[in-house]
Image (spheres, helix red, strand yellow):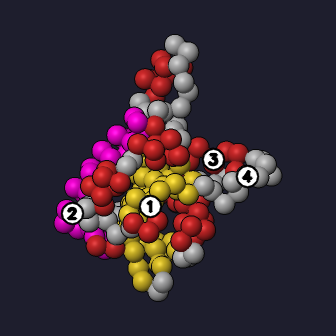
Amino acid sequence: MSDSDLGKKLIEEMDLEPFLDEYEHVTSTKMTIITPSERPDFICERKSRFVGVELVRVMEDPAQREWRIILGEHEQLEGSDAAMLIQKAVYQKEEKRASTGWKYPDRTILVVQLIGGDGKDAATYIDSELMDEMSSTGFKEIWVADYSQISPYGTVQLVGVKPKRWRGFHPHRFYGTKPYG
C-alpha cells in the first residue's frame, strides 16, 4: 500500500469512528474495526460476526457551492438535492457491491457520508417509497451519516434507511446540549 493509499485509509477510519459511536447509541450494538480493506472499506466485528462497512461521500460540487454562496443563496446543500445525491450514491455502490471480489457482499453496511447538508432536511425528502427502493439493494444496512455536527459536537447524526426498524432521522446523542462542551 502506497503512502497516499495509507493516508486515505487513515482519513476514512477517522470518518468512520463517529459513525460507529452513534451507531452504537442508536442500535445499542457495538461494532469495532478489525482491519482496513478494499471492497468494502473496512472489516468490522459486530455480535461476534464479521461485517463489511463501505463509506461513500456525498457532497455538492465545490464550484457550484462557491457560486451559490457568492450569489447570496443558502450555504447548505438543499434537502431535495441531498436526497438525490444519496440515492445516486447508493445505486452506484450497489453496482460495485455486486461485482466479483467483494468481501462479505451479503453482510456489508453502507454508510453514506452527507457533507455540507443537513440530514434532517434530507430525511424529509427520503420518503418510505424511496427507502423501500434503496432497501432493495443487497446491502445488509444503509445509513446516512450527517457530518454537519462534527465541528460543534464531535459526532454525526444518522438517518436509517435499512433495516426498517431503524428508519428515519436519529438526532446525535448530545442533541439539546450546548455545543463545544
The crowd level at tag 2 (other Cα within 10 Å; few <14, some 14-19, many 20+) is: some
Indicate the position of residue 10 as horizontal and vertical percent values. Answer: 53, 57
Magenta-drawn stretch contains 104: yes
The label number, if any, that marks residue 176 in the structure image: 4
Q: Distance between the residues labelled 3 and 1?
A: 20 Å
Q: What is the three-letter code of the residue carrying label 3?
A: Gln
Element carrying mark 3: helix
From this viewpoint, is residue 10 visible? no
The label number, if any, that marks residue 177 in the structure image: none
Nearer to the camera, 103 or 114:
114
In magenta, the rendered stretch is 80-105
Residue 163 found in image quarter: bottom left
The crowd level at tag 1 (other Cα within 10 Å; few <14, some 14-19, many 20+) is: some
Q: Name the residue under label 2.
A: 98
Q: Which residue is drawn at 70% across and 51% down?
A: 153
Indicate the position of residue 96 as horizontal and vertical percent values. Answer: 25, 57
Q: Distance between the residues labelled 4 and 1?
A: 21 Å
Q: How far apart are marks 2 and 3 (CA)?
A: 32 Å
Indicate the position of residue 11 as horizontal and vertical percent values. Answer: 53, 53
Q: Residue at x 46, y 74 (%)?
A: 44
The crowd level at tag 4 (other Cα within 10 Å; few <14, some 14-19, many 20+) is: few
Q: What is the three-letter code of the residue carrying label 4?
A: Gly
Magenta-drawn stretch contains 88: yes
